[in-house]
Image (cartoon, rainbow, N blue to C red):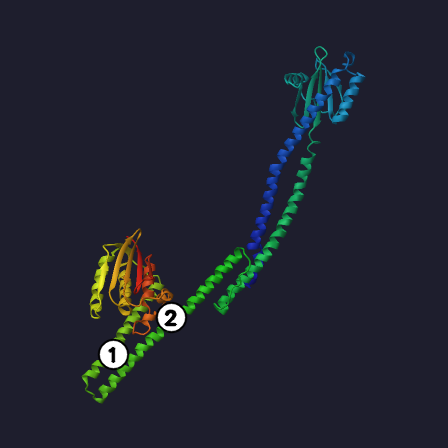
Amino acid sequence: MSTLRERARAPFTGLRGRMVLALVVTSLATLAAAALVVLPPLERRVVADRLTELRGLAFTIRPALAALPERDRRRGSPALEQLIEQLQRRTGGRIVVYSSASAELADTETTEAAEPALGPPASLREGALRRRSGVVAGRRGEFAFAATVVGKEPNRLTLVISKRLADSRAAASVMRAALPLALAAGLLVAILLALLLSRSLMRRLGRLRADAEALGADGLEHPIAVTGGDEVTVVARALEGMRERLLDEQASRQEFLSTASHELRTPLASLQATLELLKEEIGRGADDPETTAARMDLALRQTGRLTALATDLLDISRVDGGAPLRDEPVELAELAALIGREFGARLRTDGRTLKIDGGPALAAADPVATARILRVVLDNAAHYGAGTVTIAITPEPGKVRLEVRDEGPGIGEEEREHVFHRFARGQAGTGGPGGAGLGLAIARGLARAMGGELTAEPSSSGGRLVLVLPAA
């Protein structure tokens, strides 16, 4: 029931609702910005065009007005009335003519509801006389006007043309009236677009959710479909990559458990058989010290092998678990000399020697982990190498390089990464007793945990393992 309620709320509170809201808000903001940005300039342009028109009319009518004889420059003159009527038909506005004494000689607005005057005629006349063109234009309230002066005193005439701006603002008014309709249409289009876009997105998210649920129900073998090239595809690709990594880790873990079980079973079976033989011999009363000692030596070797394998498995678990390591200065030359004494005696029994090259070098590392790596690398050279084993320490900018070289068969190019896998051995170690194949894997994991690296590099003769650690 809760799932049904969540799906019912999803169109309003989920991704689809956010998309609809985002597009609606975007449409509102766009229309509001258009109203704020377009309407005021449009109205100013309309007013400016109207003033330009009236200024031009006043300028063009001046010659006809100046040509009136003095007898017609009086109130009620038919010639003056005819002239202003013609001008009124051209402009559609109000035309007023004043005498030099500011008396009204003619006015096209004769009704009682005539609009109020635009100001004292004297101020209009003075404004026009101050202009080089002889025409002054401006705005008074809802009216645009233009005034000009014709003739000289005492027969000077002042012509005033005025017109309501409401007629000129028709375009702005139409646009303002159309805004609600445009708003409604924009909101409708935004909602439709949001629903169409979210439909495809929600369908793909639904497939992704189904794949994720199938991972939990069917296991990691269920693949995640990766199609398209948008953000949903990025998420699907990331989930698919995570699934593949988890699948690889699961396979590696199963292989690790299988190999570890096999490696443990062999010495345990040998130890069990040895102890059973010892028990039978003691039960029969056999008294052969050499045979008993041989049995005990075999049991001790198998016990040592089990102990070493258990230690390696514990180290592997610590590396996988990201156990914290110390970060302090470690003098590699001193550490190499200390551990070299342990392996020097072992090598001398086989007629081999150990040599250390290089001076003091400080690395920022964990002393115990570094000693473990060095023992693993030297044990590898003692087991599978031949001739002289050389430890070379070289300080470099920002890091310290430690190489362990021997004169044995070396590590082939195709094996340089394989030898660092768990329970893996190179060709040189397949025929000998050797270990479980965990040492180099542990050593590399410890090196990387300290910010370094352990690699097998090519060499002209013998094996060559290189440890690089950050400099202290």
Q: Quadrant of residue 135?
A: top right
The answer to whether one can see residue 369 in this image is no
Which comes sooner in the sequence, label 1 or label 2?
A: 2
Element under disc 2: helix
- Vertical side of 291 occupied by 192: above or below: above
Q: Percent from the top left, x then y, of residue 441?
A: 34, 65
Q: Which residue is mark 1?
A: 298
Q: Label 1: how many residues lie within 10 Å, few (<14), some (14-19) or many (20+)?
A: some
- Vertical side of 460 occupied by 43: above or below: above
Q: Nearer the viewer, residue 103 or 412?
A: 412
The quarter in which the N terminus is drawn is bottom right
Q: Which residue is mark 2?
A: 256
- Vertical side of 439 occupied by 265: above or below: below
Q: Nearer the viewer, residue 372 or 407?
A: 407
Q: Residue at x 30, y 65 (%)?
A: 463
Left or right, residue 53 beside residue 277: right
Q: Nearer the viewer, residue 245 or 217?
A: 245
Q: Are marks 1 and 2 in contact (CB under 8 Å)?
A: no
Left or right, residue 135 beside residue 282: right
Left or right, residue 135 beside residue 277: right
Q: Amino acid at mark 1?
A: Leu
